[in-house]
Image: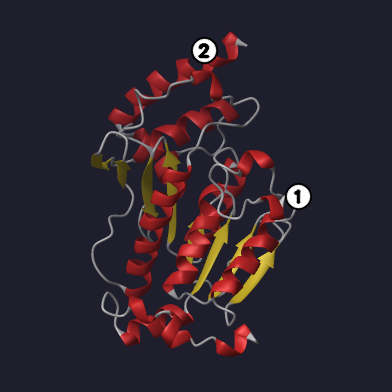
Amino acid sequence: MDHNSAFDYRRAFSRNIGWVTEAEQQRLRGARVAIAGLGGVGGAHLLTLARLGVAKFHIADFDRFEVHNFNRQAGAFMSTLDRPKAEVLAEMARDINPEAEVRVFGEGVTPENVDDFLREVDVYVDGIDFFAIEARFLLFRKSYERSIPALTAAPLGMGVSLLYFRPGGMSFEQYFGVDGRTQQEQYARFIAGLSPAMLQRGYLAAPEAVNFDERRGPSTGMSCDLCAGVMGTSVLKVLLGRGELRAAPWAMQFDAYKQKLRFTWRPFGNANPLQRLMLRLIRPMLKGQDKAR
């Protein structure tokens, strides 16, 4: 049996109808979403949006699946070991929707291809590794210049932190203030900006698992799934223009472990007095980790 010939878009996504109208479903079908990074959260974002009925994607990742990805990454299986993440996730998205237009950037996003990656895109979804701050800054800057809404949902502890950068609003750089800083200061500023509420503090059971020199840290499948749910809903609201979505300097953090939800408002971003105080607490922790080694 030719399964592709049996596919019917309207029937495949009919259970979305009710929460969206038929007309809105067709708008989702025609939307184009760019996702950079297809590991922990990025792969889950892609599959969530594919099941929402979004049918046009630009996806980018230069990495391959390894065993240590198994605890959280949507495309990580024994059958996909050492395969390119972008290639695997493209296949999975097309397995959900054979009609999907999925353009793969297997070299990742670079200064040379970023304009092509964002061409005719309606929303940019951030799935890049925490430590790839330069690539993230490039993508958010280019999205802002092109008036493309850009969102990031960070897997923090066993929860999610959402930031939305709307066209004409506060930019990524205005919020985080990472440009021209040392790498360690960039890390500190990114941590502070991602989670002003710091709900994940207090239950990190093995602090030694966080290693900035080796560019690794703990993450759970639960947090990635929470990120995908929050991101999918947020992208729906942006694409359909439905409902309130608070943009930076607002941030939203939900922590399932602590069962807490916080909205934070930080005018001037990391230049806000509360954020400056937080940075004074974070910097010694990062330096302390270096001294411990």
Q: On the image, which quarter does residue 277 sit in?
A: top left
- Quarter of the picture containing the C terminus is top right
Q: Where residue 88 appears, x then y in whole percent?
A: 67, 61
Q: On the image, which quarter does residue 19 sit in?
A: bottom left
Toward the viewer: 209 or 135? 209
Look at label 2 and name its amino acid. Answer: Gly
> Crowding near pointer 2: few (<14 within 10 Å), some, many (20+)?
few
Q: On the image, which quarter does residue 151 sit in?
A: bottom left
Q: Is residue 165 visible?
A: no
> Crowding near pointer 1: few (<14 within 10 Å), some, many (20+)?
some
Give the foreground label among 1 and 2. Answer: 1
| Residue wearing tag 2 | 288
Q: Secondary structure at mark 2?
A: helix
Q: CA distance from mark 1 to mark 2?
A: 35 Å
Q: Is residue 237 left or right of residue 221?
A: left
Residue 150's disc number:
none
The structure residue drawn at horizontal position 48% and vertical position 39%, both measured from the top left corner, is: 220
The structure residue drawn at horizontal position 58% and vertical position 83%, both measured from the top left corner, is: 99
Q: Is residue 3 visible?
A: yes
Q: Secondary structure at mark 1?
A: loop
Residue 82's disc number:
1
Q: Where residue 166 appears, x then y in whole percent?
A: 37, 60
The structure residue drawn at horizontal position 33% and vertical position 87%, both measured from the top left corner, is: 23
- Residue extending farthest to the top is 292
Is 181 situated above or below 151?
Answer: above
Look at label 1 and name its amino acid. Answer: Asp
Is 262 situated above or below 199?
Answer: below
Q: How many marks?
A: 2
- Quarter of the picture containing the N terminus is bottom right
